Amino acid sequence: MKLYQLIYVSKSLAPMSKVGLKQILKSACRNNPQQGITGILVYDRGHFFQVLEGSYNDVESVFARIQKDKRHCRVNRIISYPIQERLFPHWRMGLYNLEDSTEFDFYKLKKCMKSLHELTSVSEKRSLAKYALKIFIELKEKSTEQPEDLIEIV
């Protein structure tokens, strides 16, 4: 199976509570293993950033469902491409809520999230998305407190 990765951003229609974010996480962790999907979801002040990994058909199927979700709008695919290996192979779906996090310095990441919604150039967005992804990889490598398959900073 060839692997595929898709990164998108979207805007929440209403502020998400911790309970609302946990519901999204539970649903993803329940459904993603059936489709072989892994990745991370990041939330900050009404903005979502998500990385999905899996087969092309499965990732595109999940993304099509996400686009119809009424909890957010302005769903914008930043980048999607074939990959050699998963960056989050054991994460059914990791969740970072940047609003409340004090464990890490998320200043650069918060700036990334805001910029991804403001930039208009596709190449700038792709470059910024890859930079944000690098930050998440570093966080994943540093994280020792939680099991790798369900990282949750909320």
Image (tube, rainbow, N blue to C red):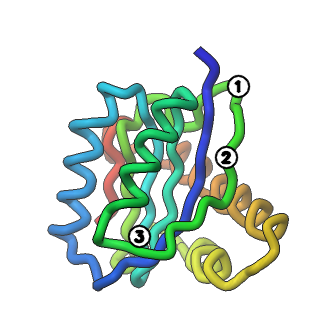
User: Which residue in the structure is indicated by mark 2?
Assistant: 80
Residue at the location (30% across, 25% down)? 34
Judged from the image, the secondary structure of the residue bearing numbered disc 2 is: strand
The residue mark sitting in front, 2 or 1, is 2
Q: Is residue 121 left or right of residue 107?
A: right
Residue at the location (56% across, 78% down)? 110
Q: Amino acid at mark 2?
A: Ser
The residue mark sitting in front, 2 or 3, is 2
User: Which residue in the structure is indicated by mark 1?
Assistant: 84
Judged from the image, the secondary structure of the residue bearing numbered disc 1 is: loop
Q: Amino acid at mark 3?
A: Tyr
Dot 2: few (<14), some (14–19), or many (≥20) neighbours within 10 Å? some
Q: Give above or below for 34 relative to 148.
A: above
Quarter of the figure with residue 18: bottom left
Quarter of the figure with residue 120: bottom right
Residue at the location (64% across, 54% down)? 133
Dot 1: few (<14), some (14–19), or many (≥20) neighbours within 10 Å? few
User: Which residue in the structure is indicated by mark 3?
Assistant: 43
Q: Give above or below for 86 relative to 137.
A: above
